[in-house]
Amino acid sequence: FELAGRGRCCWRTTVTPVGDGGEEIRSIVHPVTQDYFGTLGASVAFGREFTQADQVADPSVAILNRATSLRLFGDENGVGRELEMAQTTLTVVGVVDGVHHWGLDQDVESAVYVPHQRFAGDFDMMSLAVRSESELSTLVPALREAVWALQPDQPVSGVTSMRQLVSSSVATPRFLSILLGTFAAVALLLACGGIYSSMLYSVGQRRRELGIRIALGAERSDVAGLVLRQGVKLTVAGIALGVLGALALSKVLESMVWGITATDPLTFMGVAGLLAVVAVMACWAPARRAAKADPLESLRAE
């Protein structure tokens, strides 16, 4: 939840490694208190979290995420290294895994975490994270009472659960995924019906031919296989054209749906396999009908 103000909770600045290391980068700086990462459930990969002593320690300390440590020092484990930020030298005491501060659909940005008591200054907004097993509806009054017991005129706003924050951050990608999935399911049904109808029409047109083949000694299984192979050839050609079209449009889909890449081989293979199975199933019934062609009816017609 948030405490008052429309001020900033963090800022972006230039961070420079001290000594031999990587590159000078622009990074977001987050002032946080002790137990911040434990409350959020973030994983500390190397080193440790902040302690109460770190809030007033001199020289000051910092915690980086993996990406920042790698870019600054050329190593994900930058514990013990030093960096310079706004003419202040900070010692790295921990490295954490990437935290999605702006939503799961956003990339993990370069981040430097510093002790709140030393760097928050006169910021008029603060976000507090509380870990609890209670429902939000019963927790909100207790949170407000706890804040007002310390500062009666302190506004408390934006109280929400982490589940709600995560859900809202992916609401648009989730809606687009459901929409595209629905369209894909309808397209798959239409494709299945189209293949079945086309093959059924083809078998009807070739009924006399197939009957004559059987009369001349062809096995019914051979006739069914003939029709099935024809359908498979059309299916392979259609899938090949579909894959080319998907590759051409994949960049558009990548920008609309979170969590997919433009050329994910597993996705292409899985969809192509699904289409192949559906097409073969749609061809199977006409192939069985072709195998039941009556040779006497065909000979009488001739």
Image (cartoon, rainbow, N blue to C red):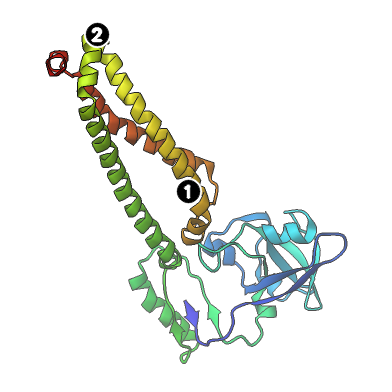
Q: Badge 1: how crowded within 10 Å, few (<14), some, or many (20+)?
A: few
173 sits to left or right of 64: left
Numbered badge on residue 216:
2
Numbered badge on residue 11:
none
Q: Nearer the viewer, mark 2 or mark 1?
A: 2
Residue receiving disc 1: 245
What residue is drawn where x is 61% and y is 69%? 34
Pick whichever of labels 2 and 1 is earlier in the sequence: 2
What residue is drawn where x is 46% and y is 90%? 152
- In the rendered image, residue 299, in percent from the top left (x then y), is placed at 15, 14
The answer to whether marks 2 and 1 mark residues whose Cβ atoms lie closer than 8 Å is no
What residue is drawn where x is 75% and y is 59%? 71
As shown in the figure, which amino acid type bears the numbered disc 1? Gly
196 sits to left or right of 103: left
At mark 2, the secondary structure is loop
In the rendered image, the residue lying farthest to the bottom is 153
- In the rendered image, residue 167, in percent from the top left (x then y), is placed at 41, 64
- Image height check: is 7 above or below 268? below
Residue 10 lies in what quarter of the image? bottom right
- In the rendered image, residue 244, in percent from the top left (x then y), is placed at 50, 45
Foreground: 230 or 153? 230
Residue 275 lies in what quarter of the image? top left
- The answer to whether one can see residue 260 in this image is no
Foreground: 277 or 80? 277
Foreground: 105 or 37? 105
- Image height check: is 297 above or below 261? above
